[in-house]
Image (cartoon, rainbow, N blue to C red):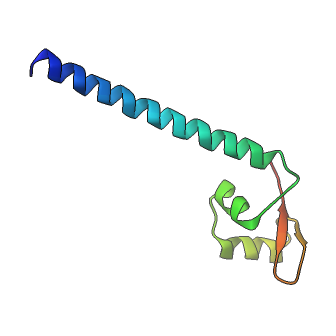
Amino acid sequence: MNFEDYVKRELQLHTDLLNQIQTTLSELLSYQKIGSRKFITPAEYCKLNGISRKTLHRYIKEDMVIAKKISSRKYLIQSDI
């Protein structure tokens, strides 16, 4: 491997690392924004807690989470963050 190839490979590694850092920071900022609200959507709650919608519905039924119904088919979940 010559010096030029080495530099290109190192540059690519650093670029990949910076992209990973940027993605992680974006996700953290998104979670912080979501967590600062009193109520969040079911999809946001599931993503934050790593659960499925089916599990969320079971949690609501078992009063493990607080849900506020806003229409006949839509509701918001109280954020526990």
Q: Is residue 6 left or right of residue 77?
A: left
Residue 41, above or below 73? above
Residue 17, above or below 54? above
| Residue occupying the point 75% across, 76% down | 57
Viewer-nearest residue: 42 or 22 = 22
Residue 63, above or below 79? below
| Residue occupying the point 84% across, 66% down | 76
Q: Is residue 22 left or right of residue 71?
A: left
| Residue occupying the point 16% across, 19% down | 4
Q: Residue furthest left?
A: 1
Viewer-nearest residue: 51 or 75 = 75
Count how many numbered circles sit on residues in the image.
0
Residue 1, given in percent of the width and then of the height, sits at: 9, 22
Residue 21, given in percent of the width and then of the height, sits at: 51, 33
| Residue occupying the point 76% across, 49% down | 34
Residue 52, given in percent of the width and then of the height, sits at: 63, 69
Q: Quadrant of residue 51?
A: bottom right
Q: Is residue 12 left or right of residue 6?
A: right
Q: Quadrant of residue 39?
A: bottom right
Q: Residue furthest bottom?
A: 72
Residue 61, given in percent of the width and then of the height, sits at: 82, 77
Residue 37, above or below 55? above
Viewer-nearest residue: 67 or 2 = 2
